[in-house]
Image (cartoon, rainbow, N blue to C red):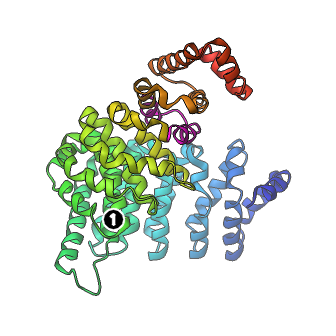
Amino acid sequence: MCLCCMQGMIPYLPELIPHLIQCLSDKKALVRSITCWTLSRYAHWVVSQPPDIYLKPLMTELLKRILDSNKRVQEAAYAFGLEEACTELVPYLAFILDTLVFAFSKYQHKNLLILYDAIGTLADSVGHHLNKPEYIQMLMPPLIQKWNQLKDEDKDLFPLLECLSSVATALQSGFLPYCEPVYQRCVNLVQKTLAQAMSQPDQYEAPDKDFMIVALDLLSGLAEGLGGTIEQLVARSNILTLMYQCMQDKMPEVRQSSFALLGDLTKACFQHVKSCIADFMPILGTNLNPELISVCNNATWAIGEISIQMGPEMQPYIAMVLHQLVEIINRPNTPKTLLENTAITIGRLGYVCPQEVAPMLQQFIRPWCTSLRNIRDNEEKDSAFRGICTMISVNPGGVVQDFIFFCDAVASWVNPKDDLRDMFYKILHGFKNQVGEDNWRRFSDQFPMPLKERLATFYGV
């Protein structure tokens, strides 16, 4: 629904939503079905109101419709945006899970696939709030039962793997009792698909690589959810050898998923990844092609994660990737996410190897600053800004022409760590002292008033 239409509807919603909630129990299935869909259009407004007024009665009725005798109504009941509600759903988790788990015994094939999607979306929405013993005990047995029933070549495994990926990420340590058989089966799926592709290179009908893609994605979910506790599973498997093959696959989606897994394993257990970096980095460099946005995005992110772990040992690999990254950040119409990831990775490379990256500062400083000014404070932004500050100290001339953009990027921070704030302070005051009071005043008069006030308040310039 367009914003202007939504604004026009808002005055009527306090009366309309209760009426629609009543329609959810209409005796005609078509009315129940279309009402589910109609309510989904107002999900954003519903969750913005006090929960007892609309969300609670709506959830009660929607959960009944999930168990409706009519398949179309069951399907439509999932249209209400669980992702919109996010943590608003936490108080109803037991009730929601109870309904979803009961639906396992009631649903036929098509709606089972929708059920997997709903559970995955719920896990994405509520995150770690799902990690409670009573919720795990409700949710995991039916999922694992389905997992055990499905054969490796059954395509119904795809949505179940995607669902488990979200669940594993949300449950974190709560997924530990289930992780070993799930991990091993994913590795076997990757290995089996690669073996089929190699044994039948000229076959008209190539093996279905979707099995491999969803298995790689679930391994990423496990690595993200379990963190360092995945280390022993990685140590006892040949996943890194398999990833080396996947990273060179002709199919972009396979490469995309393998680069995501590389980044997640780099964060979770770099001690096992490190010995492969010399083989992996040239492949990452050749995949910095912005025509394939998702592949390029994941390769860029993985390079940034690797650089943080490698530190100064990243130096031999800078030349393999830096020029492509600088090209991407200066490319017109580059999608926002790719720009942000590219800026973060350039910053991280400059943090660990400033002497190698700082000479190119003038070529990327302006788009770097504009890309990162709008992202919220987090660890990735922190390491990237430490990198840019270190590079400015090595090559201050590289930032002079675009210093206003640096000032604006610094002002985007809400609460930088004390030592990072000190780095900003030294650069800002160093520049001011270098140009002199009068020149600084003329320079800062160009600033929009909010920027001027923020820099004066937080950094005294």
Can you give x and y, in whole percent of width and height, for residue 151 in the image? 27, 73
Q: Dot 1 corresponds to which residue?
A: 254
Pinpoint residue 329: horizontal percent, then vertical percent.
49, 48
Residue at horizontal 20%, vertical 48%? 278
Q: State the count of labels.
A: 1
Name of the residue lying farthest toward the left: 236
Q: Residue at x 22, y 58 (%)?
A: 244
Which residue is at the front of the view, 20 or 69?
Answer: 20
Residue in view at x 31 percent, y 62 percent: 215
Which of the image's four quarters has the N terminus?
bottom right
Q: Where residue 66 sits: x, y (%)?
A: 56, 65
Start-end of magenta stretch:
364-386
Q: Is residue 62 magenta?
A: no
Q: 201 or 172: which is nearer to us?
A: 201
What secondary structure prevails in the magenta region?
A: helix
* Residue 138 visible in this rendered orientation of the protein: no
Image-quadrant location for residue 284: bottom left
Measuring from the top left, give residue 317's x and y in whole percent: 27, 44
Question: Magenta includes 379?
Answer: yes
- Kind of element beneath mark 1: helix
In the drawing, does residue 297 fall left or right of residue 148? right
Tag 1: residue type?
Val
- Please indicate, yes or no, whether residue 311 appears anywhere in the rendered image: yes
**Picture residue at 31% right of the left edge, 76% below the top:** 208
380 or 87, nearer to the observer: 380
193 versus 288 height, above or below: below
* Residue 103 in the figure: left or right of residue 36: left
Compared with 156, 425 (above or below) is above
